[in-house]
Image (cartoon, rainbow, N blue to C red):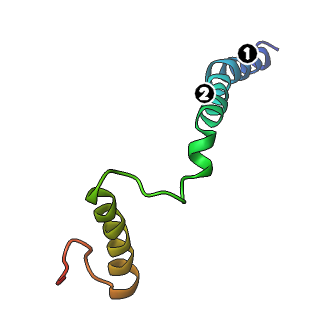
Amino acid sequence: MQKTHSVRVLAIQFLYLGMLPSVVYFISFVLLTNRLLSRFYTRLWGVSQDSYQALWSLWWVNHALTELYQHPWHTTL
């Protein structure tokens, strides 16, 4: 009886001390960044030329690894 009670107490403590704060933070994150998340793939990030460099870098890593089968840190361009 004592062991079952301690397992139940540990489960309740995990729920309140572990899961509840995580769920609250996740819901807060979604509510506060809803507008940003809905437009995440429609905008370039960064300022000036940095955003185009970051976009090219993402394309190059994907291209080098999936099509050329080479290390992405080497380019002849």
Residue 64, compared with residue 41, is above or below; it is: below
Comparing 14 with 63, the one in front is 63
Residue behind mark 2: 25
Q: Nearer the viewer, mark 2 or mark 1?
A: 2
Comparing 70 with 11, the one in front is 70
Q: Which of marks 1 and 2 precedes in the sequence? A: 1
Q: Quadrant of the C terminus?
A: bottom left
Comparing 57 with 10, the one in front is 57
Comparing 13 with 74, the one in front is 74
Q: Quadrant of the N terminus?
A: top right
Q: Secondary structure at mark 2?
A: helix
Mark 2 Cα shell of 10 Å, populated few (<14), some (14-19), many (≥20): few
Q: Secondary structure at mark 1?
A: helix
Image quadrant in which you'd find residue 64: bottom left
Percent across and percent down for residue 35 are: 61, 42
Image quadrant in which you'd find residue 27: top right
**In the shown orientation, is residue 20 left or right of residue 33?**
right
Q: Residue furthest top?
A: 2
Residue placed at 69% from the left, 18% from the top?
Answer: 16
Q: Disc 2 versus disc 1: distance between alpha carbons?
A: 24 Å
Residue behind mark 1: 9
Residue placed at 54% from the left, 59% from the top?
Answer: 41
Q: Residue furthest front?
A: 48
The amino acid beneath tag 2 is Tyr
Percent across and percent down for residue 7 are: 73, 21
Residue placed at 73% from the left, 15% from the top?
Answer: 9
Percent across and percent down for residue 47 are: 32, 51
Q: Are marks 2 and 1 in contact (CB under 8 Å)?
A: no
